[in-house]
Image (spheres, rainbow, N blue to C red):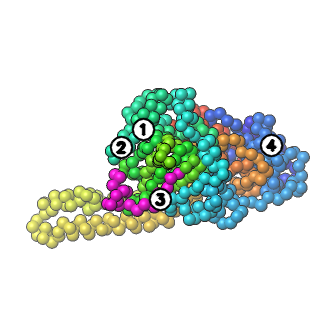
């Protein structure tokens, strides 16, 4: 299913291209699914893969629109092909900063446009979207209580890995002490008889609609999107008030649930870690410390977006004298996906360049750094002074010595950091972006269905007059380093590994193609 680029005949009406870079083709995971086809546009596709994900083309025809399957027939006339305006991958024609969004996100947002969501809501405030016609049915197809029991009966699941059961009573959360293989009857008993909430992890492994929803949101956000399902008995609450370290997209699938959402704790806006369980007194009663910002009951088909950091809790409700069980799906993203974590990955590369270029970064620390900086410095300075003569002790106090030299130490650190910034360049920043994107592509969900070739393929410039055309750039990552091009795709990622333990494949080597011989 793979066509080597080195032995392909030249396309008609093309001129000799500059030496092409080395091509490396990296499936993100080698577990099932279609092979990725790379072929020059003038070659017919392999019968094993009639709709290639992307193609490589060179020469004057490189910027032209391909045919129905992303390739050109050997008899095609380059001059007869319509010109394709080059557009950056993922960039929308609707305006600067605007990107096309998936149908799943547009459905979730209802009447609110994605542009308005990202400019006015995302990472800023909660949002409730009420169900329109057909939304309850669509939401109900995601997951439900009976489906959860069926999955537990038909699959070998493990407590704490696939699900946990807990109940909130007397002001604290209690988690059922269960181990081993999940017993569906035991889960049903704890749910119905002892009011335990079931927290079901990674439902995208079993639910195709959740799989599609999460994969679509991964395209929209460029980050992993996980999921959990919360099934809560009537008149019950499963979790204590808390805040998450992820942005959540909640979809009510069965029953109703009453949500109370509060402003973030001071200094905990957009946190990098989730909170511990909070006392109810923090959010309720006369001495409540956090402001209530949303008090809402979700019904089937209703949706809720909540940024990380907002404190919340939820419980099932009584309507018309009757309380029913509740089920909602929570999809989450942007965990450790902030500028801080990006800079944490960038700085080692920047400091490495500084170390190799500037001798100031290679000089040793002061021999007495422990005496002038750090918590133990005053104690060590007292010991040093004990050996001084009385005259020396009078001339300098402990504070003067540690204060002056400590300030000098801090000044040196700040100066070196300023110098390090001069080694932040485009190549280094882009390399870190590639590393993050490569990791994402290797672990993200594969598409539910193979991408459809509509003929409107995206163009990825590579080098000179060499470009790649891709049916769907969301599932392909291209990294360029010197004379080497690496393509990573997620078509064969294992759905069952998503957001969980990864299965290593001993044969997961790169499929490499040396294109430099094509003059």
SS at mark 2 in the image: strand
Q: Which residues are magenta?
A: 279-298
Q: Earlier in the sequence, mark 1 or mark 4?
A: 4
Residue placed most toward the observer, 164 or 337 = 164
* Residue 27 location (% of width, % of height): 64, 40
Q: Residue at x 74, y 45 (%)?
A: 452
* Residue 393 location (% of width, % of height): 13, 67
Q: CA distance from mark 1 to mark 3?
A: 26 Å
As for residue 283 lying within the magenta part, the answer is yes
Mark number, residue 294: 3
What is the quadrant of the N terminus in the image? Answer: top right
Q: Earlier in the sequence, mark 2 or mark 3?
A: 2
Sort mark 1 into few (<14), some (14-19) or many (20+) by Cα contacts within 10 Å: many
Q: Earlier in the sequence, mark 4 or mark 2?
A: 4
Q: Which residue is mark 1?
A: 195
Q: CA distance from mark 1 to mark 4?
A: 67 Å
Front tag of 4 and 2: 2
Front tag of 4 and 3: 3
Q: CA distance from mark 2 to mark 3?
A: 23 Å
Q: Is mark 1 in CB contact (under 8 Å) with mark 2?
A: yes
Q: Residue at x 37, y 57 (%)?
A: 283
Q: Which residue is mark 2?
A: 169
* Residue 197 location (% of width, % of height): 45, 40
Q: Earlier in the sequence, mark 1 or mark 2?
A: 2
Q: Residue at x 35, y 68 (%)?
A: 411
Q: CA distance from mark 1 to mark 2?
A: 10 Å
Mark number, residue 182: none
């Amino acid at each position: 299913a793979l066509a080597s680029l080195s032995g392909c005949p030249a396309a008609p009406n093309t001129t000799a291209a500059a030496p092409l870079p080395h091509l490396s083709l990296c499936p993100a995971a080698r577990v099932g699914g279609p092979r990725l086809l790379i072929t020059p546009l003038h070659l017919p596709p392999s019968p094993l893969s009639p709709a290639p994900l992307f193609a490589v083309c060179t020469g004057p025809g490189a910027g032209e629109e391909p045919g129905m399957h992303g390739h050109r027939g050997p008899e095609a006339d380059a001059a007869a092909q319509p010109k394709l305006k080059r557009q950056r991958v993922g960039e929308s024609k609707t305006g600067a900063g605007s990107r096309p969004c998936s149908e799943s996100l547009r459905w979730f947002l209802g009447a609110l446009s994605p542009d308005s969501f990202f400019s006015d809501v995302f990472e800023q405030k909660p949002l409730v979207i009420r169900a329109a016609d057909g939304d309850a049915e669509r939401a109900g197809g995601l997951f439900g209580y009976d489906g959860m029991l069926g999955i537990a009966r038909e699959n070998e699941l493990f407590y704490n890995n696939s699900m946990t059961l807990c109940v909130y009573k007397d002001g604290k959360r209690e988690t059922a002490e269960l181990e081993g293989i999940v017993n569906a009857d035991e889960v049903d008993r704890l749910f119905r008889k002892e009011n335990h909430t079931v927290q079901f992890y990674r439902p995208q492994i079993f639910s195709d609609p959740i799989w599609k929803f999460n994969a679509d949101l991964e395209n929209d956000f460029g980050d992993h999107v996980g999921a959990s399902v919360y099934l809560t008995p009537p008149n019950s609450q499963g979790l204590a008030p808390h805040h998450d370290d992820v942005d959540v997209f909640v979809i009510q699938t069965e029953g109703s649930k009453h949500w109370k959402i509060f402003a973030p704790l001071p200094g905990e806006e957009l946190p990098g870690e989730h909170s511990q369980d909070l006392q109810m007194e923090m959010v309720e009663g006369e001495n409540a410390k956090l402001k209530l910002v949303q008090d809402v009951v979700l019904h089937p088909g209703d949706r809720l977006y909540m940024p990380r950091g907002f404190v919340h809790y939820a419980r099932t409700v009584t309507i018309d004298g009757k309380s029913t069980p509740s089920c909602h799906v929570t999809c989450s993203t942007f965990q450790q996906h902030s500028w801080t974590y990006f800079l944490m990955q960038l700085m080692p590369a920047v400091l490495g360049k500084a170390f190799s270029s500037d001798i100031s970064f290679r000089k040793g620390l002061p021999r007495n750094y422990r005496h002038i900086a750090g918590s133990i410095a005053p104690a060590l300075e007292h010991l040093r002074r004990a050996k001084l003569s009385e005259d020396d002790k009078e001339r300098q106090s402990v504070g003067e010595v540690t204060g002056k030299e400590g300030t000098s130490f801090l000044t040196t650190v700040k100066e070196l950091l300023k110098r390090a910034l001069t080694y932040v360049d485009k190549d280094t920043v882009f390399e870190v972006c590639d590393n993050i994107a490569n990791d994402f592509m290797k672990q993200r969900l594969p598409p539910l269905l193979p991408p459809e070739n509509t003929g409107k393929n995206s163009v990825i410039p590579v080098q000179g007059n060499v470009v790649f055309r891709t049916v769907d750039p969301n599932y392909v990552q291209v990294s360029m380093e010197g004379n080497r091009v690496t393509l990573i795709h997620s078509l064969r990622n294992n759905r069952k590994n998503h957001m969980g333990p990864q299965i290593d494949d001993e044969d997961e080597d790169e499929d490499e193609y040396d294109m430099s011989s094509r003059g």
